[in-house]
Amino acid sequence: MRRLGAIEAGGTKFVCGVGHEDGTIIERVSFPTTTPQETMSLVLDYFTGKNIEAIGIGSFGPIDPVLGSPTYGHITTTPKPHWGGYNLVGAVSGQFQVPVGFDTDVNGAALGEYTWGAAQGLDSCLYITVGTGIGAGAVVGGELIHGLSHPEMGHILVPRHPEDTYGGFCPYHGDCLEGLAAGPAIGSRWGKPAGELPADHPAWAMEAHYLAHALMNYVLILSPQRIVMGGGVMKQSQLFPLIHTKLQELLSGYVQHPALNAEIGSYIVPPQLGDNAGLSGALGLAKLALARA
Amino acid sequence: MRRLGAIEAGGTKFVCGVGHEDGTIIERVSFPTTTPQETMSLVLDYFTGKNIEAIGIGSFGPIDPVLGSPTYGHITTTPKPHWGGYNLVGAVSGQFQVPVGFDTDVNGAALGEYTWGAAQGLDSCLYITVGTGIGAGAVVGGELIHGLSHPEMGHILVPRHPEDTYGGFCPYHGDCLEGLAAGPAIGSRWGKPAGELPADHPAWAMEAHYLAHALMNYVLILSPQRIVMGGGVMKQSQLFPLIHTKLQELLSGYVQHPALNAEIGSYIVPPQLGDNAGLSGALGLAKLALARA
């Protein structure tokens, strides 16, 4: 089986690994994210001599993932020192003459769940991570969505909960979805970290309100065949039934499909790749790059 | 050049035509929408002997456009008498042994603008029609979006305008986008038909508020390369600059792309196919069906 390289490029560390086309990860290592020179030197050294036939990179952003764009493969306007404008794909392609796949970390995770995880065997899916931020990626007809740029679905605008007085923390939009429903919003709204709130705390019904509103919009715009919800906040498994009920209430029978009615419990599900999501996603990007080469 | 058949299946009339692969419509005719037996008999007679190599149908809905589904090609749960559960594709395929394309009217219109109109030459676009209802379709990587079903983007939920006391008229969702911003909402809110309100009436700033919120969500979820806005309400051309400004205010510089900044005037545009939109869209569906056959 062919060997593929995977890079999960994060703001704190770069996780690198080697895997197979069936999604198996054979080995992994991680390096701290310091300067591009330092970090990438370790990354490129790691892959040298590993006989990989393609490399996939799931990266922190914002990035330019649009093939044919002059800044394709670059990290664009990140506030992270040294990395703004860095040509990540160029650095990898300069060293290894293999196909390189490149996308956002969350698009990578969506592709991973689609290829080997909770959305395996379908034509489309949406993956959303709810943690210190909110991000989502979608596969439609086997392809990750791009257009002008990559989606930024965590920042959509949804109606506020009528009893919510919290202003939202997004530096750009204030009370966009991320501003109202990511982990830090829960912490600020209720005065203690989300992880310390009991499962029956009213925080979770409010959280489900916001996430169900977001899912309603994703469903009506993308009509994905499954929705995979991951990230730190979604470890609160009591959220799933609350979201199921609230989404059905919002849709109000408008879309007639078993997935949104009797089968909603298998429509909105947790990820299957768990802590491997990032690296598996990058492996998925490598596999896709190889298929296209 | 090959001859293609096009059917714009509406709730009031069926417009049928013959055209070429370059989008030219050679001839057209229309029949009232009565019962499937009556209307389809006229439609099938019309195409007989026309030497068409494929037929496209853009239909009123809801429909099942998902290839491989047991009810593919059917109109599903429409309140329109006689048409619920009718197999439109089956009726056409039973008579003509040519590839048949089938989608919603608004997906057809999106495909038409993408193939021959305001979004020609791009990889992706979104088409939204704002009239007695609100519908939108999107092309991503050359394909119309489907998944579980077809999108129903007109019913997304957006934050209310702080000064709006109107409750919304959507029978399913009350104050969803369609409930708050389609033509009938403007009429009910301001006490006279939208078409009678002067161009400087505050109605239009409120309308732009809702449409810009919807566009914000479409942009963040789909990242389309162009947005085409049509339908009766969008004939109020003063809406375009109001929407441009409001969308930029909402995005707040978050997505760095010329299309959303200096070039927004050529990013959000009126349709180019005008009154041909429906039939051209159906022709686009025929062309797509032929390409896939």
Image: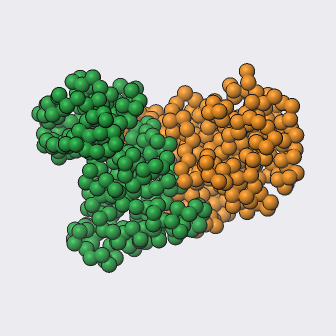
Chain colours: A orange, B green
- At x 15%, y 34%, the residue is B46
Q: Residue at x 31, y 53 (%)?
A: B273
Q: Quadrant of residue B199?
A: bottom left
- Farthest residue in the front direction? B1
- Looking at the image, residue A182 sits to the left or right of residue A54; the answer is left
Q: Position of residue B24 (x, y in %)?
A: 28, 45
Identify the residue at image location x=77%, y=57%.
A83
| B211 vs B108, nearest the viewer | B108
Q: Is residue A117 above or below residue A44?
A: above
| Residue A76 in view (yes/no) | yes
Drawn side of residue B71 relative to residue B38, left or right? right
Residue lying farthest to the top in this orientation: A1
Q: Is residue A161 something one can see in this rendering?
A: no
Relative to residue A155, is residue A233 depicted above or below?
above
- In the rendered image, the vertical position of residue A80 relative to residue A219, given as above or below: below
Q: Going 32% across and 63% down the picture, which residue do you hit?
A: B234
Q: Position of residue B141 (x, y in %)?
A: 50, 42
How many callouts does the rendering have? 0
Q: Quadrant of the C terminus of chain B?
A: top left
Residue B85 image position (x, y, % from top left)? 25, 32
Q: Residue furthest bottom?
A: B200
Q: Is residue B237 above or below residue A119?
A: below
Query: Closest to the observer: A132 or B288?
Result: B288
| Residue A181 place in picture, x, y as percent | 59, 56
Q: Quadrant of the N terminus of chain B?
A: top left
Please tell me in which quadrant of the rendered image residue B91 appears.
top left
Left or right of residue B89, residue B121 in this image: right
